[in-house]
Every structure is written in C-alpha cells, then in structure tokens.
Amino acid sequence: MSRMPNGFLWGGATAANQCEGAYREGGRGLSNIDFLPAGEHRRAVADGTLDPHTLGNARFPSRSAIDYYHHYKEDIALFAEMGFGVYRFSVSWARIFPQGDEAAPNEDGLRFYENVIDECRNYGIEPLVTICHFDVPEHLIQQYGSWRSRKMIDFYGNLCRVLFTRFKGKVRYWITFNEINMILHLPYMAAGLTFREGENRLEACHLAAYHELLASARAVRLAHETDPGNQIGCMLAAGNTYPYSCRPGDVLEAMLADRESFFFTDVQVRGCYPSYARKKLEREGVTLPIQPGDAETLKRGTVDFVSFSYYNSMVASSDPELQAAKNGNIFASIENPYLESSEWGWPIDPLGLRITLNTLYDRYQKPLFIVENGLGAADTLENNTVADDYRIHYLREHIRAMKDAVLLDGVDLIGYTTWGCIDLVSASSGEMRKRYGMIYVDADESGAGTLRRFRKKSFGWYQKVIASNGESLGCEQEG
Ligand code: BGP
C-alpha cells in the first residue's frame, strides 16, 4: 500500500489576479496587477524599473483573465468532479477595500468571496485562502508608496480582521502572503514597489519586507484570537539550490543562495531575524526601522504551517565564469546538465521536491503544505480535449517524490494543490499560452476566445489519483 495518510488534502490552486478578471465590477478598485502588461515590457514593470503608467496601449491580461468572477460556479463544480478536498484561492484586496485605506469594506467584494467559499463548502471542499497573492490596491501605492510605509501593516490588518470575522467557521486554512521571498526578485509584481532614480532598491525591498513580516505576525495572532481553530501559514517560493560541484566554494554559494529564500520563512517560523540575515543587512548598509514592541510582535506571531511553491531546483557556483552564465529566470540559476527543462526554460526536477520537503521539515519541524506545483506548457485543444501526457508525466513524478518524502522520510505534509488547476494568466510572462490547468480555457493571447472550459486528459488522471489517495498514479495511461 502506498496511499497518503488519511485526511491528506488533494486539490488545486489559483490566484485572484490571474483568473478573476472583471477588474472594474462589484465596486473593485485598481491594483498593481492591473498594470502588469503582456509582452516585452512585463519584466521591467514587474521588477519595478519601468513605470506601467507610461505605457500607452499595452494589453493588461489580468483585467479580463479567464473571467472566473462570472464562471466560479462552473469552475468549482469541475474541481469537485475531480474530487478536490481543498481549493486554494486568493482574495483581491481591492475587491474588499477598493482604495485600501477605507474604514469599511466593500460588501459586494465580500459577498463574492462568501459565495466562492459557500460553493466550496457545498461540495465538501476545504477553502485555503491566500490573503495577499501579489496584489496591492493602486491607491495604497500612489498614496503611501505601498509596503515601504508602516501604515500598510494597519491596512492589511483591517483586511485580515474583516476576513477572519466574516468567514469564521467557514475557512480554517489561511496563508498570509504568497511567495514572500518574491519581493526581492519582482518587487512591483510582488508588493507594488517602484523605485526612484538612484534609490537603494535593496534597502526599499527589505524595508517593505520588514513591514510584511510584521503584518504577517499580527495576522497570525489575530487569526488565533478570532478562532482558535484557524490554521495560518507562511508561503515561500521554494526549491533548493544545489552546489555545481563538491568544491567547497560551490557548496558555500549554494548555502548562501538558499538562505536568501529561507530568510523570510525563518522569521515567520522562528519569530526573529536570523543572525546571518542581520549580519548581511549590516554589511549591505540596510537599516530596518525597528520600533519598540516589534521584536515581541514577531516572536508572538509564528505560523502554524509552512506552505510553499515548488517548480524547480537551482544551481550555484563560486566560479565567476559559471556565475556569469546564469539563465534569465526569476530565480536566476546556472544550468543543471542533469535536468531537462520545460518549454519556458524551467528545469524539471521531481527528486528536488523530495529534497526540498526534507530540507524544510528538518529546518522548521512544522507541518508543510505544497500549495503550488505544476508544468506550464503550450496545449493544443483537439476534439474538445487536450492530450497532455507531458503534464501527467510531470505531476506523476512529482507526486511520487512527495510520497517518498512522506512515506519513506516521515515528513509531515498537510496537502498538495497543483498550480493553476484551471488555465489562467501566467504571472511571469503574462501569457495565456503558458497553461498549467487540468481544465482548458478557450482564451488566447489577444484576449479573444469563448471562455468555454474543457477537461484535459490530466483531469481524469488526477481524479483517479485523488480517489485512490495517491495510490494509483496511473502509469498505464501515459502515452
Ligand atoms: C508562482 C506564483 C503563481 C504562478 C506560478 C507559476 O511564482 O505564485 O502566481 O503564476 O508561480 O508561474 P508562471 O505563471 O510565471 O509560470
């Protein structure tokens, strides 16, 4: 028998900004994500070097996305048909507080999420809510400079209070910030940060991250105070960095690269800035605006579980030539000669998932939750379906590695949600073409399409995986 432990949560994940669309409906305000263009300028906007408001007639794919806002019932019914026990989604901050700094929330926005949650509950699906998946109300960016302002802690706190109160008893699992370490890589996309000419970017990012960490810690306490049954976690973009060789210099580089990802989670789990981070910030001339009581806030707001996305591992070396040859992925890495890559150049490393699970569990000794994993690929719809054997293969190998981590290594894992269980807009590229779903959505790069949903081959495959609690990985079905 190689089933996952009883109660293991299987499901899928989406984010408001990549699927909802309807960006001006129900009283929703604007957010940073509405200004992320498709095409060549996306990266420069996402990393805060190009002001999106200067772009004339760019297309902003999140504004319409897959129109989940009007299709959520149909979509959740399909998730239920696959047998989901959990569905991870995020709320759009600007739907609930259109400006971000109002005293009272927008009832229409709240009702939308209430409907989503009730719909899940009707099918016995556990909602897993990401409170902030990259989006920040535009007004907070213009007025306060987004997370560089300490006031953001209170605005985010209001959002949390409203969510915890309104959905008490209906939502048990919460995540404070999606991929909190993304702030160092794509600060505008991840946290609404833009930079002035000559400004110290690193300092601004760390200042904003400090405020997010305080906000996260406060949210944890508030969640527990509101309902002791709440489980609230942190979330990082994970994936270990391997040393290019056993040369000690390479091993050191790999360790340092890993620390860059772990640093935020270290704070959220352990309740204080780790000594290596304090030293590094000191060396980099970054001073944090620490106020009396902050240390206590961090200490008392440690998370219940550690969730993470896993797409790939990375490679580091101390050799300057190799360092110079890093790829252009968001988490830049030296190429690993032992791995194949996706069409978008993301290495494919199922065993890396087992390694990552063990690393995180060794480090934190907290229950883990894989809340993103999947293959972005260009699918072809034929006869109302997609023969996505490549996706089945990818998922199967990753699930196998996950099972080994749990069943052989003893990692405590709450659940597994595949990323983009329904096709949605790609965060890094803004494309519709980069599809992760087990449900195909008829929408293309120009925003055209019927928006009809189709079951891919992976839909039936995942249904069987879930029904057998991971025992049947359906090897015989692979084409
Ligand atoms: C993570 C994000 C998601 C998602 C995923 C896949 O970084 O949390 O929002 O998009 O990556 O990335 P992409 O869409 O760039 O392929």
Image: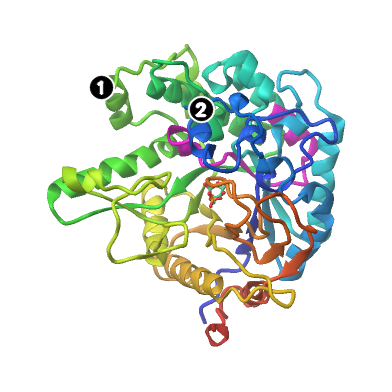
| Left or right of 161 on screen, residue 304 | left
Q: Of the numbered discs in the image, which one, if any, rests on residue 50? A: 2
- Amino acid under disc 2: Leu
**Image location (x, y in percent) of residue 251:** 20, 49
Residue 358 shows in the view: yes
Vertical placement of 29 versus 352: above or below? above
Q: Which residues are magenta?
A: 159-186
User: The residue tagged with tag 1: helix, strand or loop?
Assistant: helix
Q: Quadrant of the C terminus?
A: bottom right
- Amino acid under disc 1: Arg
**Image location (x, y in percent) of residue 407:** 45, 70
| Left or right of 128 on screen, residue 40 | left
Q: Quadrant of residue 385?
A: bottom right
**Outermost residue toward the bottom?**
476
Q: Nearer the viewer, residue 474 or 164?
A: 474
Residue 318 shows in the view: no
As measured in the structure, the alpha-carbon distance from the residue carrying label 2 to the one carrying label 1 is 28 Å
**Image location (x, y in percent) of residue 130:** 64, 42
Q: Residue at x 22, y 55 (%)?
A: 244
Q: Nearer the viewer, residue 302 or 306?
A: 306
Q: Of the numbered discs in the image, which one, if any, rests on residue 283? A: 1
| Left or right of 218 on screen, residue 242 | left
Q: How is the image coloured?
A: rainbow
